[in-house]
Image (cartoon, rainbow, N blue to C red):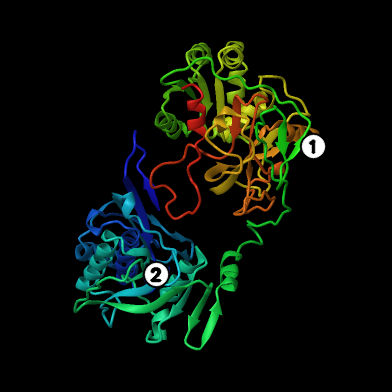
Amino acid sequence: MVAKLPVPGETHTCSGLAWGFNPYLSAGDQYVGAYTAVVESVCKLVASGFKRENAYLSFQEYFEKLRNDPKRWGKPTAALLGALMAQVDLGVGAIGGKDSMSGSFEQLDVPPTLVSFATAVGDVDAVVSPEFKAPKHQLILVLPAYDENTGLPSKQGLLDAIGLVESLVDKRDAAAIYTPGYGCLAEALFKMSVGNRIGVELSEVLDPELLFTPMYGSFLVELERTGELWYTDDMFPVSVGETIADFELRLPGEAIPLAPLQEAWEGKLEGVFPYRRSGKTVEQLSFRKAENGAALTGQGPLTRISFEPLPLRAATTHLAKPRVLIPVFPGTNCEFDTAKAFERAGAIPQVFVINNLSPAAVAESTARMAELIRQSQIVMIPGGFSGGDEPDGSANFITAFFRAPQVTQAVRELLNDRDGLMLGICNGFQALVKLGLVPYGDIRTMDDGCPTLTFNTIGRHQSRLVRTRIASDLSPWMSKCQVGDIHTVAISHGEGRFVAPQELLAQLAANGQIVTQYVDEAGVPSMDWSVNPNGSMMCIEGICSPDGRVLGKMGHTERNGYGLYKNVPGNKFQPLIEGGVAYFL
């Protein structure tokens, strides 16, 4: 795992985390198992672009109840000695760990367990992901020398192998790196192929025995460029072959298709944990503000329909830096990313934490909230898990707070009298829908004819990247986007399925209030779970009020920045927040 550090402003510094453990090795030889766990965790970190010298370790241990059996006492002793020797050889120290725990229940014992976790900080520009990037790239296996008795890499060979890989990372010669573990080289080749469905043609000189030989401490590297590779008495690179466009593993005289292997691997638990469901395609909406005020919609060539949209007034107030109020409710967790995104776009964000510890504190927060809304041009409700995201009640506390007369009045003044804007993402979108601000443009009483956001059809929380397409430019939030633009955005929600009566859906489409839809790679909306992860009707990801001033969406547009999602294709920057800020400039 690699993540940028959450600090104000922009940073290139990121943290990495990797782990290592093989229960079979640990059960057979605790010294070897622990040594290997440390090696694997550090090598995974190096394979991700981090430096060995910057790494630190933490351990988690589980062993059977020791009783009075010397053999039982010897297992954690051997494991700790193995972990210690690996630290000495690698020059990497353990700085903490979880307390050892008993792994016995009556006559049942866990295998001797020492899991090694390695962490380090590094530069986001040096981060390398493991999937193959392109065909016709050379593949090499960086091999340290191994002890014939224990199977462990030699100290110098391990350090030399790590040094070669670090030099390839520094020179940006490594397109992808993987350190083989329990599954050996065969597993490494398969998993590196799956990401972009790029196959491998093995070298004729490669010994097939290497495919299934344990090689902890080795590295499989896809070379961006074929440069000079050095070797030592204890380490040497071996040619494995090259990447190919076809999704298969080619050996001399035969080819193994990888798609069936991927299906067998990914579909193992689908019977009890389904993650796929096909679905029909959905109409691709395209609404553009026409010069004569009519709406345009349709898939393919645009067709004119009879509808006069509400006129969108231009902002009468122009500011060097509009003020943005970001209220933080119990459970909100996206306020820092949101504030950073608005600051980057040229606004002045103000994060206001709601105090609900007592009735008096709630009353005070209510009054202060109304005051801050009147001082702001934008109100943005960020994402999170308000009230613990209780079943069928997400954002209930937020909506109750906004329905307080003081706050309701301040919101109406913002939207109707002061040309203000509102935005809600994820939990904030849920609040806007349940308030009626989208799609109606006002805080109102809700009834059975109103839309809502409810449980994902997959039946569980979804946290992933999706593609969304701009379907309407009605809202000022979309002023820097074009209809048809496709963006890759992050989602994280359990109740993101937009549902509404069919008559209302048709009206929203005609009015241009359906702003964004979930789409596939070709830009086609679909009810397939791989495209529409929550099952929203008409693949709706975001909607707006009739005049476009209030916008709500599920995707986390604010979760964007330099170096994020490096190994994911697509346009990850959606200038939605920039469009809203520009409205006042």
Quarter of the image where one finds residue 419: top right
Vertical comparison of 532 with 417: above or below: below
**Which residue in the rendered view is the most extreme toward the front?**
291
Near mark 1 (Cα within 10 A), the count class, few <14, some 14-19 or many ≥20, is few
Q: Which residue bears the numbered disc 1?
A: 502
Tell me residue 492's x, y (percent): 54, 43
Q: Residue at x 41, y 86 (%)?
A: 204
User: What percent of the width, then of the height, locates residue 209?
Assistant: 40, 85
- The x and y percentages for residue 59 are 33, 56
Q: Residues within 10 Å of mark 2 (few under 14, many from 20)?
A: many
Q: Taking 73 as reference, is 433 left or right? A: right
* Marks 2, 1: nearer the viewer: 1
Q: Amino acid at mark 1?
A: Gln
Image position, residue 445 (x, y; %): 72, 20
Q: Which residue corresponds to the image point at 49% horizontal and 81% vertical from the top-left?
A: 250
Asked whether residue 133 appears in the rendered view, the answer is yes
Inspect the image, locate mark 2, and give the three-letter code of the amino acid beneath it. Gly
26 or 556: nearer the eye?
A: 556
Left or right: 470 with respect to 66?
right
For this view, does 160 lie left or right of residue 423?
left
Left or right side of 326 for 456: right
Above or below: residue 230 compared with residue 128: below
Which residue lies under the disc numbered 2? Answer: 181
